[in-house]
Amino acid sequence: MNTLNNGLINGATLLVVDDTPQNIDILVDALGDRFSLIVATNGKEALEAVSGEMPDLILLDIMMPEMDGYETCARLKSDRKTEEIPVIFLSALTDIDEMTKGFQLGAVDYITKPFNVREVLVRVETHLAVKMARDILENQNEILEELVVERTREIVNTQDITIRMAASLAETRDNETGNHIIRTQRYMKRIAMGLKDREEYSSVLNPRLIELLVKSAPLHDIGKIGVPDAILLKPGKLDNEEFSEMKRHTLYGMNALLKAEEEMRGESFLQYAREIAYTHHEKWDGSGYPQGLSGEDIPLSGRIMALADVYDALISRRVYKEPYTHSKALSLISEGRGSHFDPQIVDCFMEIHEEFRQIALELMESEEEREAVRR
């Protein structure tokens, strides 16, 4: 996490709930220098604590006597005053059903015991940044009304930082993405600019819309923050059940952005962010997900991101594959014309693919990937 994020979250208040004194001691030692800590040893104490001082995040043990972590979380989420506090479960339970239950109750993450203190710190930083980004988005309309004209540039910069921060959360959860967010944003801008010069899109893709699409693009995978680590970080191929859960990141992203969008009035980049997050895995022939949309029923924003996202995935190294060459990526995308991708978007891509290559060469993390892009 960068210095800006660290500076903003230092001093946040954490509630640590665990009935094992040794675990509390470990967490206090690991987090006490960075954050203000409140300690509770059971669910009842935790509920009493939040009634006195509202924490920014809760680390909650599951296996506790009388009132376990699940019941404690359920009560927190049923109270409007505490429902938005991020809850990270701490437990030795590793069963996927138990983990799923926690997420269904509203937890944002799950750390298994015995835990690594560095992992706990990173997870805490990540979800405090999520909360901060959400709070900024929810209050943005009020901020815009209060700021005067001469501060417009500052508003825009703040908005861009917020988007970057929120988008980086998905990157933090998925350590393979690297500069993927920045690259796909640049690819999307180039495709949109290319399409604007075509008669069919000249009246649709005006400069304002292109600006909104580009601003929204970094949030395309924000829903991955809702996918369990056991699935998101699995090094091998996902089974059918795991893949079904992975596909839900489109729904998680759409719901999160819709909630933020409802707090704003008028035209908002969040509308396009929501479209992109929800539809960038749809396919032109209707075989994609989550809705199985086809053709122009897929929003243009999602159709553009579909190609940008796939191109970047092809030329990037993954745990299950080596990076493909730029030429191989062109071939595979061409094969997907009219099946996976909008034919006109593929045609536009083929005309400007050298610009994609230059973006990739500039922003790829490894020399191995850059070498593949050169070919």
Image (cartoon, helix red, strand yellow):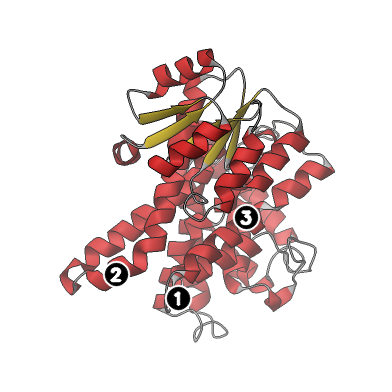
What residue does disc 1 label? 209
Q: What's the distance in space between the residues labelled 3 and 2, CA to CA? A: 27 Å
The residue at 52%/51% (across/down) is 83
Residue 230 lies left or right of residue 244; in this view the side is: left
Quarter-of-image position of residue 19 = top right
Q: Earlier in the sequence, mark 1 or mark 3?
A: 1
Residue 22 lies left or right of residue 146; in this view the side is: right
User: If the image is split into quadrants, where does the N terminus sit?
Assistant: top left
The residue at 48%/55% (across/down) is 218
**Badge 3 density bin: few <14, some 14–19, many ≥20, Cα 10 Å:** many
What residue does disc 3 label? 252
Q: Give x and y (percent) for residue 152.
A: 23, 68
Residue 4 lies left or right of residue 364; in this view the side is: left
Amino acid type of the residue tagged 3 in the rendering: Tyr
Element type at marker 2?
A: helix
What residue does disc 2 label? 144
